[in-house]
Image (cartoon, grey):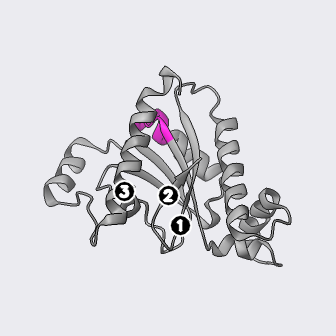
């Protein structure tokens, strides 16, 4: 990658190393100590990455990347779709907290992606319609999840074009093994 992504690439390496720790561990590793809580209260948060993740209860970014309090700026929304609220949250993390890496984290077995293949009504239709635009008629759940992630990545890149040192990438979390594939 280009030199302008030095901070982002360092953050990405931390995520990859954290995921390896998570896969091998029996318990969460991230620092959630009283000292860390006090430090972030007194000195503010300094997350090294933004993670846009699905709301699925099996997908816990802090655990997946062995991160503690203040390490990640996590935005969770069903189907990891990106709209104005999510873009505003990302913009805040980039402009006010200095994050230079944004990862859209999809996952296998995503219920929102599966729901998008059917008919929906109510508020969930806003989410499934967005996913439908991304996946079309792709019947394979994993391929559909990747397409959905790629659409969210494209939206973020389009909206934050002026940030040339910002790296925005997609990833897929495998709910069965705990591994993350970055793309």
Instruction: Tell me which residue sits at (64%, 65%) in the image.
Output: 79
Instruction: Tell me which residue sits at (20%, 45%) in the image.
Output: 42
Tell me, yes or no, if residue 83 can be seen here: no
1 with respect to 17 (left or right): right
In this view, 107 is above or below 14:
below
In magenta segment, residue 30: no
**Secondary structure found at label 1:** loop
Q: How much space separates mark 2 and mark 3, taking CA atoms?
A: 9 Å
In magenta segment, residue 95: yes
Q: How crowded is mark 2: few (under 14 residues within 10 Å), some or many (20 or more)?
A: many
Q: Which of 167 and 160 is in front in this view?
A: 167
14 with respect to 124 (left or right): left
- Mark 2, residue position: 180
| Picture disc at residue 87 | none
**Secondary structure found at label 2:** strand
Total numbered labels placed on residues in the image: 3
Q: Nearer the viewer, residue 127 or 134?
A: 134
Q: In terms of sequence position, does the residue under pointer 1 or pointer 3 come before the other?
A: 3
Q: In terms of sequence position, does the residue under pointer 1 or pointer 2 come before the other?
A: 1
- Mark 3, residue position: 20
- Mark 1, residue position: 174
> What range of the chain is rendered magenta?
92-101
Residue 18 in percent (x, y) is at: 35, 53
Instruction: Tell me which residue sits at (36%, 56%) in the image.
Output: 20
Q: Choose top left, top right, bottom left or bottom right for residue 129.
A: bottom right
Q: Residues within 10 Å of mark 3 (few under 14, many from 20)?
A: some
Instruction: Tell me which residue sits at (53%, 23%) in the image.
Output: 2
Magenta stretch prevailing secondary structure: helix
Answer whether labels 1 and 2 touch (C-beta < 8 Å).
yes
Q: Choose top left, top right, bottom left or bottom right for residue 77.
A: bottom right
């Amino acid at each position: 990658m280009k030199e302008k992504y030095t901070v982002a690439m360092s953050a990405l390496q931390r995520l990859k190393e954290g995921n390896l720790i998570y896969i091998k561990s029996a318990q969460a590793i991230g620092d959630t100590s009283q000292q860390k809580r006090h430090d972030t209260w007194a000195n503010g948060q300094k997350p090294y990455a933004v993670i846009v993740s699905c709301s699925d209860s099996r997908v816990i970014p802090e655990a997946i990347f062995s991160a503690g309090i203040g390490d990640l700026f996590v935005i969770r929304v069903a189907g990891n779709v990106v709209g104005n609220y999510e873009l505003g949250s990302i913009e805040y993390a980039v402009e006010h907290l200095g994050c230079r890496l944004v990862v859209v984290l999809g996952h296998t077995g995503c219920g929102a992606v599966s729901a998008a293949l059917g008919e929906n009504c109510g508020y969930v239709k806003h989410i499934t319609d967005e996913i439908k635009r991304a996946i079309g008629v792709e019947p394979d759940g994993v391929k559909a999840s990747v397409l959905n992630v790629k659409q969210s990545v494209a939206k973020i890149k389009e909206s934050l074009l002026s940030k040339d040192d910002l790296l925005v990438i997609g990833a897929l979390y495998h709910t069965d093994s705990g591994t993350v594939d970055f793309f």
